[in-house]
Amino acid sequence: MELSYGVIPIYRSDNNLKFLLIQGKDTNDWSFPKGHLEPNEKPAQTALRELREETGINKVELIPDLSFRDEYEYKEKGQSFSKAVILFVGFVDDLNISIQPEEIESYQWVNYDQAISILSFDSQKNILKKVLEFLSKKGL
């Protein structure tokens, strides 16, 4: 099984939340920044590195002990693959993005309802629902 790590970036202004979605260049799917583990990296380090590489975001405050696992199947060149993505959740303090043009087609900062309508995978929509429930329950 292929394994990736990523971040659900959240920008908070007053009581409004914006979520960063990216569109992959190869797949055109809308999801969250993510990528593969490099040697000697821990999962959270990978997630933060991929966020930095794909979006230019350097400063993010991960919510301790909060992550979600997304598993799915995909096809590439006629072959089926299994993938698991561990998504951490973090707050950023800046909306400025510098996308990695080799991998990222586009990006959007969107509110929750927009994110639910734009995300390409139902599993990630369900994760985002859990994130919002968690944030509401904790008063974040």
Image (cartoon, rainbow, N blue to C red):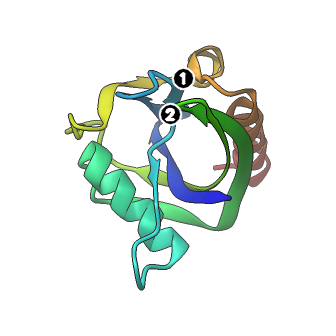
> Image point 30% across, 46% down: which residue?
54
Horizontal side of 138 relative to 63 (left or right) equals right
Q: Quadrant of residue 23?
A: top left
Q: Which residue is more in the foreground, 100 or 64?
A: 100
Residue 22 percent location from the top left of the image: 42, 31
Q: Please report whichever mark, 1 or 2, sits nearer to the chain's N-terminal start.
A: 2
Residue 28 percent location from the top left of the image: 44, 21
Horizontal side of 80 relative to 11 (left or right) equals right
Q: Are marks 1 and 2 in contact (CB under 8 Å)?
A: yes
Disc 1: which residue: 111
Farthest residue toward the front? 78
What is the CA distance from the residue labelled 1 to the residue labelled 2? 6 Å
> Image point 52% across, 31% down: which residue?
77
Quarter containing the N terminus: bottom right
**Structural crowding at the residue carrying mark 2, measured as other residues with C-alpha within 10 Å and reported as few (<14), some (14–19) or many (≥20):** many
Under circle 1, the secondary element is loop
Residue 89 percent location from the top left of the image: 57, 54
Q: Is residue 86 above or below residue 131?
A: below
User: Mark 1 belongs to which amino acid?
Assistant: Asn
Q: Which residue is more in the foreground, 50 or 16?
A: 50
Under circle 2, the secondary element is strand
Farthest residue toward the bottom? 40
> Image point 31% across, 60% down: which residue?
59
> Image point 22% across, 37% down: which residue?
102
Q: Is residue 80 above or below residue 120?
A: below
Q: Which residue is more in the foreground, 99 or 108?
A: 99
Residue 70 percent location from the top left of the image: 71, 47
Disc 2: which residue: 19
User: Mark 2 belongs to which amino acid?
Assistant: Phe
